[in-house]
Amino acid sequence: MKRFSCDEWAELITAYLENDIDEPTRGLFEEHLTGCEACENYLHQFRVTVNALGTLGPEPLSGDMRDRLMSAFRNRRDSRVEDRSGS
């Protein structure tokens, strides 16, 4: 059975938290956690961060910023349409 290094584990933490890994891999992760205080702390910090950011609302945009973004989106859309039509 594969053993994960701390670096490999950290790269897959999001998949672990979202239950997007298979059961054998999940078991290996949890086994690693029981013997690695650093990874256990990292997981805790990651969860705290996700919970904190999950409660933030969107920051309102100024009218000028909204207009500039909408213009950029329109220009991008228009250039894609031109590319597809061969113009």
Image: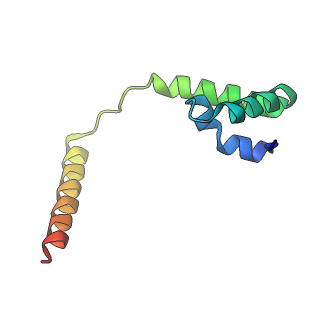
Q: Is residue 36 left or right of residue 62?
A: right
Residue at the spot 63% in from the left edge and 31% down from the top edge: 46
Residue at the spot 67% in from the left edge and 28% down from the top edge: 45
Quadrant of image for the C terminus: bottom left
Residue at the spot 81% in from the left edge and 29% down from the top edge: 31
Give the image quarter of residue 32: top right
Comparing 27 with 62, the one in front is: 27
Q: Is residue 80 left or right of residue 27?
A: left
Q: Is residue 49 left or right of residue 86?
A: right
The percent position of residue 14, horizontal first and vertical second, equals: 59, 36
Quadrant of image for the N terminus: top right
Residue at the extreme right: 35
The percent position of residue 48, horizontal first and vertical second, equals: 61, 24
Q: Is residue 85 above or below residue 12?
A: below
The percent position of residue 28, horizontal first and vertical second, equals: 77, 33
Q: Is residue 56 above or below residue 9?
A: above
Give the image quarter of residue 30: top right
Residue at the spot 84% in from the left edge and 32% down from the top edge: 36
Q: How many marks?
A: 0
Q: Is residue 7 left or right of residue 50?
A: right
The percent position of residue 63, horizontal first and vertical second, equals: 20, 41
Give the image quarter of residue 11: top right
